[in-house]
Amino acid sequence: MHLLCSAAGPIRHLLLFAPEYEAEHFAAIYGALVASLPADAAITVAAEPGAQPHIARWPCDPARLAIVEIPDISITPWARDPLIAAAANGAPALLTTPELERRDDLRAAATLAEKTELASAPSPVAFEGGNILVGESHLFVGVDTLTALGDDGAALFETALRDLEGDRREIVPIGSADDAPSETFRTAHAGEEEWREIFHYRAKEGTRQPVFHIDMFLTLAGKGAGGGERILVGDPAMAAEMLGLPPHPLCLANRFNAIAADLEARGFAVTRNPLPMIYMDDPKKRRRTWYYASSNNALVQREPDIVWLPAYGHDNWPELEITDRQNREIWEGFGFEVRMIGEAQKLAENLGGLHCLTNVLRRS
């Protein structure tokens, strides 16, 4: 078994998860994504029964679509996280985590293995798929994953990786040597009303990453012209400048800068791209939640070079069309065809994006 690269050949088989509670809310996103996939790409959807009427309306040839019903459990759209896509003897396979505390996402992985021909192998240590990106010769892992494993667990993880792949990939930790801010609350006022602002939503004590998953601010783009692995690193200060705003003091720009500098020092070809920090208001609860509108959380294929980017310049944030356009131009400068997927604010408000939504099971 070997792990599938996050930015490699053409996408031939994509896995999605469709819970009933988000199937209608995300309908336009699912539909736009499946309609824009390569014409010969197969699609497997692990779906709760109540989601299936919405899936039936997706603009997709039914012959390409396989629905795996997962009854009696409750999943999230992000149920890719217990899995890392792999290949075994030329067939799609899954490396699965032994634990994940989020609804029944872990049980969904077991159901997939039972109801399909997908081979699966258990990982000896816990991981979350969004905190791991697979390069051609490197495995990028968020330091929070490695820290949670401890020295013995991290060594076991490295041994398991070597058992899977020999010495094919070197682990590159992504994060800081010191703690990053955990979830932070601040009181604000709108006229006479007192509001609560939330920053670094759901970030735990002792975290060393600026965002809980590295795929929210890091994108692998395959090898560059010089032959080295090309990586995009999100930059909230760049986004603020493009929008004519000062960087928010809690946007953690220095953390992202340090990660980019470390990757450059390791010899990677690093490009910075705008990563807007925006907010969502809940007037009933008088609460403002800040989050990142991530264009790094993208779907990438090579030869032909295509990238699927979430688009945020709509609804409450039409001005983000500026950063959408800049992210498009960066990828076009790399020679990629860019396919924009709209309504992505719905993904970001749920702390996710396109990469969070998908597992590529097979590439050429």
Image (tube, grey):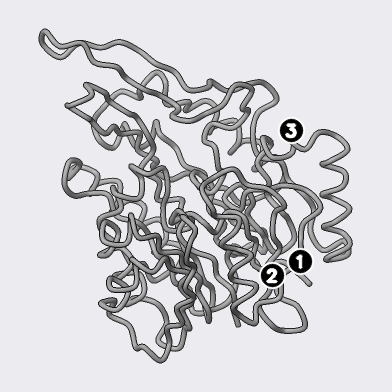
Q: Quarter of the image for the N terminus: give it.
A: bottom right
Q: Is residue 209 above or below residue 231?
A: above
Mark pair 1, 2: CA separation: 10 Å
The quarter of the picture where residue 257 lies is top right
The circle drawn on residue 121 is: 1
Residue 76: image x %, image y %?
45, 53
**Front in this rendered view, residue 34 or 312:** 34
The label nearer to you, 1 versus 2, is 1
The quarter of the picture where residue 239 lies is top left
| Mark 1: amino acid | Ala
Label 3 Cα crowd, 10 Å radius (few <14 / some 14-19 / many 20+): some
Residue 158: image x %, image y %?
84, 50
Residue drawn at (33%, 42%) of the image: 349
Q: Which residue is mark 3?
A: 147
**Front in this rendered view, residue 229 or 66:** 66
Q: Which residue is mark 2?
A: 86
Q: Is 19 left, or right, of 91 in this rendering?
A: left
| Mark 2: amino acid | Ala
Q: Is residue 60 above or below residue 104?
A: below
| Mark 3: amino acid | Thr
Q: Quarter of the image for the C terminus: give it.
A: bottom right
Residue drawn at (30%, 46%) of the image: 323
Contact check, label 1 and label 2, Cβ < 8 Å: yes
Residue drawn at (26%, 61%) of the image: 24
Residue 334: image x %, image y %?
47, 63
Q: How many callouts does the rendering have?
A: 3
The label nearer to you, 1 versus 3, is 1
Mark pair 2, 3: CA separation: 24 Å
Residue 235: image x %, image y %?
44, 37
